[in-house]
Image (cartoon, helix red, strand yellow):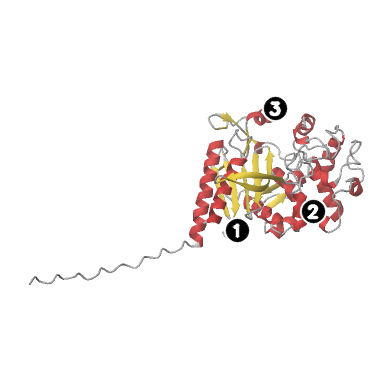
């Protein structure tokens, strides 16, 4: 008889090792690394000396990164604590404040501005027709004084003397209207300067005080300042102008390019901070005067649309353009971007002032807000703010899907 075959004992199957879920700190580090890489790539591509950016994703800690240098002559690294001029992003905050006053019954959007300011535009033929709403949706027919050769000439003769808001409106009052109020769209800044005067007339306080108490503080944002009434504790980063803006600035009296600075393969730039700052820090005011750390700007944009600063009906008024031919509501652009092959809705505003190019926005379907600023203007074609906006949105949406 054959010997019985011995049956081997069954091999024990090891229990599967459970992979621990990443901690909140690890997730935040990963998202921060992705944002840093996106900002580094964007800055290196367009040649900006310095960039600061922030991204706020619901359920995650806010992310703030910086890339590059704050000064091309010293190569001092830029940090998230540095201040940038966010220019026309200020318009969104001014419009928010006006909408708050409307919620309180202090102002009607479709009333003529003269109801509240009286003679505010001198002999301008549209003075009695322009409404409060039209100040904020660029349908008032006023010219954009910031790009007007006549204003540029006046500013060049007084670089060390700040502009008063009334002087801006006096200049606009001497210009012919572009079209009848309400009939067309043309981006401009003077309407938001007039909105600042409305804020002061209706509250009895300075625009800076009202913006801080009504916009900044409720948003948890302290490091943002409306010049020329208040200033950051340290100067904004050194900022640079290239191309046609370099040519225009170097024609100003007393402005010389003695440093020979360049970006992107010997593209000459001029450091805007080497000249007088009085005009740059006053001419925009409530249409473009805020200086800020970028995380604070992202916080404010989230607060505008998530119910912190405005009632839902006010948000709806803000994001509803009056003209079918315009995507601009009240101090905000209503548009789309593309992330991970899919389109997303975005409420955004850009900002451009000598030396700085910026954007801030909010993704309403995802409660995501972002803000960033570069210390170079104009940015090269194809390497502008939309590119980084879409990269930040891609990171945020991927995090929410994970």
How far apart are the alpha carbons under marks 3 and 1?
A: 48 Å
- The residue sitting at the left extreme is 1
Q: In front here: 156 or 246?
A: 246
Residue at position x 68%, y 39% in the image? 352
Q: Secondary structure at mark 2?
A: helix
Q: Which residue is mark 3?
A: 251
Instruction: Name the disc covering residue 99, or none.
Output: 2
Q: Residues within 10 Å of mark 3 (few under 14, many from 20)?
A: few
Count of labels shown? 3
Q: How much space separates mark 1 and mark 2, taking CA atoms?
A: 25 Å
Q: Which mark is residue 162?
A: none
| Residue 60 percent across, percent down from the top left | 56, 59
Q: Position of residue 225 (x, y in %)?
A: 71, 51
Secondary structure of the residue carrying tag 3 is: loop
Query: Where is the N terminus found, in terms of image quarters?
Result: bottom left
Query: In front: 42, or 2?
Result: 2
Mark 2–mark 3 distance (CA, rounded to whole Å): 41 Å
User: The residue tagged with tag 1: helix, strand or loop?
Assistant: loop
Judge whether residue 373 can be spotted in this image: yes
Q: Point out the tag, 1 or 2, that comes first from the N-terminus.
A: 1
The residue depicted at 56 percent of the width and 36 percent of the height is 46
The residue pinned by badge 1 equals 58
Q: Are marks 1 and 2 in contact (CB under 8 Å)?
A: no
Mark 3 or mark 1: whose residue is earlier in sequence? 1
């Amino acid at each position: 008889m054959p010997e019985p075959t011995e049956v081997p004992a069954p091999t024990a199957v090891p229990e599967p090792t459970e992979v621990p879920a990443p901690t909140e700190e690890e997730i935040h580090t990963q998202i921060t690394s992705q944002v840093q890489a996106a900002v580094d790539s964007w800055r290196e591509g367009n040649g900006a000396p310095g960039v600061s950016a922030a991204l706020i994703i619901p359920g995650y800690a806010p992310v703030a990164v910086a890339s590059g240098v704050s000064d091309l002559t010293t190569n001092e690294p830029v940090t998230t604590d540095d201040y940038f001029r966010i220019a026309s992003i200020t318009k969104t905050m001014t419009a928010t404040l006006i909408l708050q006053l409307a919620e309180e019954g202090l102002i009607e959007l479709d009333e003529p501005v003269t109801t509240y300011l009286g003679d505010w535009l001198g002999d301008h033929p549209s003075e009695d027709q322009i409404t409060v709403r039209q100040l904020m949706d660029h349908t008032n027919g006023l010219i954009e004084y910031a790009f007007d050769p006549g204003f540029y000439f006046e500013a060049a003769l007084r670089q060390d003397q700040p502009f008063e808001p009334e002087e801006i409106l006096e200049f606009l009052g001497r210009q012919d209207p572009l079209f009848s109020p309400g009939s067309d769209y043309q981006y401009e800044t003077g309407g938001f300067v007039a909105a600042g005067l409305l804020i002061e007339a209706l509250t009895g306080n300075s625009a800076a005080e009202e913006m801080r108490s009504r916009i900044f503080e409720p948003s948890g944002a302290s490091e943002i300042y409306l010049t020329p009434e208040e200033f950051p504790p340290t100067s904004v980063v050194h900022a640079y102008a290239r191309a046609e803006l370099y040519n225009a600035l170097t024609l100003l009296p007393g402005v010389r390019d003695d440093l020979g600075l360049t970006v992107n393969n010997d593209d000459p730039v001029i450091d805007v901070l080497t000249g007088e700052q009085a005009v740059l820090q006053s001419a925009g005011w409530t249409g473009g005067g805020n200086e800020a750390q970028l995380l604070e700007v992202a916080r404010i944009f989230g607060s505008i649309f998530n119910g912190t600063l405005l009632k839902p009906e006010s948000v709806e008024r803000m994001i509803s353009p009056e003209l079918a031919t315009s995507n601009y509501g009240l101090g905000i652009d209503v548009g789309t971007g593309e992330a991970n092959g899919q389109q997303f809705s975005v409420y955004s505003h850009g900002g451009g002032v000598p030396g700085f190019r910026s954007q801030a926005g909010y993704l309403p379907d995802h409660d995501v807000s972002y803000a960033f600023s570069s210390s170079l203007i104009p940015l090269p074609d194809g390497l502008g703010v939309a590119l980084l906006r879409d990269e930040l949105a891609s990171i945020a949406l991927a995090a929410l899907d994970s």
